[in-house]
Amino acid sequence: MEQDLNIGQTDDRQQAPEALLSAPFALVIRVHNAELPVAQRIKQAAAGFSPLVIVDDCSKVEFCLATQVLSEIPGSIMLQMRGKPNRGRALKAGLRALKTSGYAFQAVVTLDCGGLNTPFALQTICEALQNHPRSLIIGILTEEAYPGRLRTIGRNITRWVARRILKLNIEEGMTFLRGIPAEFLEGLLENSHEHERYLSGMIYYARKIGVEVIFQPVTPPVGYVPRPNPLEDYFTFFRYALVSLLTTLVDYAVFLAVHSLVKDLLASVYAARVVSVIINYLLVREGVFYSGKRIIDTLPRYLALVAFSGWVAARLMDMGMRRFGLDLVLAKMLAEMTLYLFNFFMMRWFVFRNWRR
């Protein structure tokens, strides 16, 4: 790991005069392109934690002031990561530096600067640690009071698959906010996954050695949009596959009916898409990607993707039928399968992506 980071330490190692906590808790802060006001709020919230490790995860030069503000916290240890930003790698580096710092602490709390950065959220994790000192605490976003019927169905399916089929005790909305007992730290550094999988690997390892995992709801700041953890991306794809199966049945029925009447390939493709587009749009918006953006922002992008995908599908079908002698249904199936992952990632990152992330 030496080639990935530089480690520095401030001269002033005095603990903040007003301790926020009744137990000696350490704090690891991962910083990436943080805004200055956010860093100032975190600096105030960090009073009472000792020791404190700050991991600058490849921030751009224009965000150096925020990192400098955090490094001014008394007794802080500063790490500078190199290469590409990676939340899991940054967290593991911070925990490793904390373990070798020589400080004594009962547990460590982790925080992503630019994420759930409110003193309330930190206090919530600390209180959970005090009530469950030998448990792994995972902060999760509190759900909306009225998330909507489609979103509720999607969440219920996700959790059912995770718990009953995959045997994973996880929740959607997991954040970088964690509470980790000190006695759990050494084994966690030695046995968990690297990089992004390290965040989810914590839960796997805890369950493996019999450590209780507690999912603690926390309230995010107004307007905060979380970055999904790696496991949630897999479950998003699972929900997308279910929705795709439903809309594909509608699409095929309309396509075959129209083609039997007009005998025009391109017209049949677009007719099927027009019928299925409303169902698919509503399902993927509310039941798959949980988009909080307005319809006026996402619908034009969605329609543009549908039009482009339909044109490409027609060209692929025509090529399959003319050059390879495929029948109509097989040519359509192969064309749709070829575009399947493309459509998923375009919806995930172009149509329904929230650009505030």
Image (spheres, grey):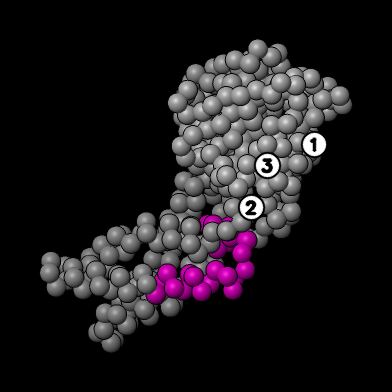
> Amino acid under label 3?
Ala
Measure the alpha-carbon separation of dots 3 and 2.
Answer: 20 Å
Measure the alpha-carbon separation of dots 1 and 2.
Answer: 23 Å
- Which mark is first along the chain, 2 or 3? 3
> Amino acid under label 2?
Val
Residue 51 placement (x, y as % from top left): 71, 21
Can residue 254 be seen here? The reply is: no
* Residue carrying label 2: 225
* Residue carrying label 1: 44
> Which is more toward the observer, 4 or 143?
4
> Which is more toward the observer, 13 or 173?
13
- Mark 1, residues whose alpha carbon is within 10 Å: few (<14), some, or many (≥20)? few
Q: Give the structural element (helix, strand or loop) at label 1.
A: helix
* Residue carrying label 3: 66
- Mark 2, residues whose alpha carbon is within 10 Å: few (<14), some, or many (≥20)? some
- Which mark is first along the chain, 2 or 1? 1
Q: Is residue 61 magenta?
A: no
- Which mark is first along the chain, 1 or 3? 1
Pair 1/2: label in front: 1
Query: Does 171 appear above or below 356?
Result: above
The secondary structure making up most of the magenta span is helix
- Mark 3, residues whose alpha carbon is within 10 Å: few (<14), some, or many (≥20)? many
Magenta segment, which residues?
Answer: 285-307
Q: Residue at x 37, y 72 (%)?
A: 308
Q: In the figure, is residue 12 to the left or right of 324?
A: right
Residue 202 placement (x, y as % from top left): 55, 28
Q: Residue at x 18, y 70 (%)?
A: 319
> Which is more toward the observer, 205 or 7?
7
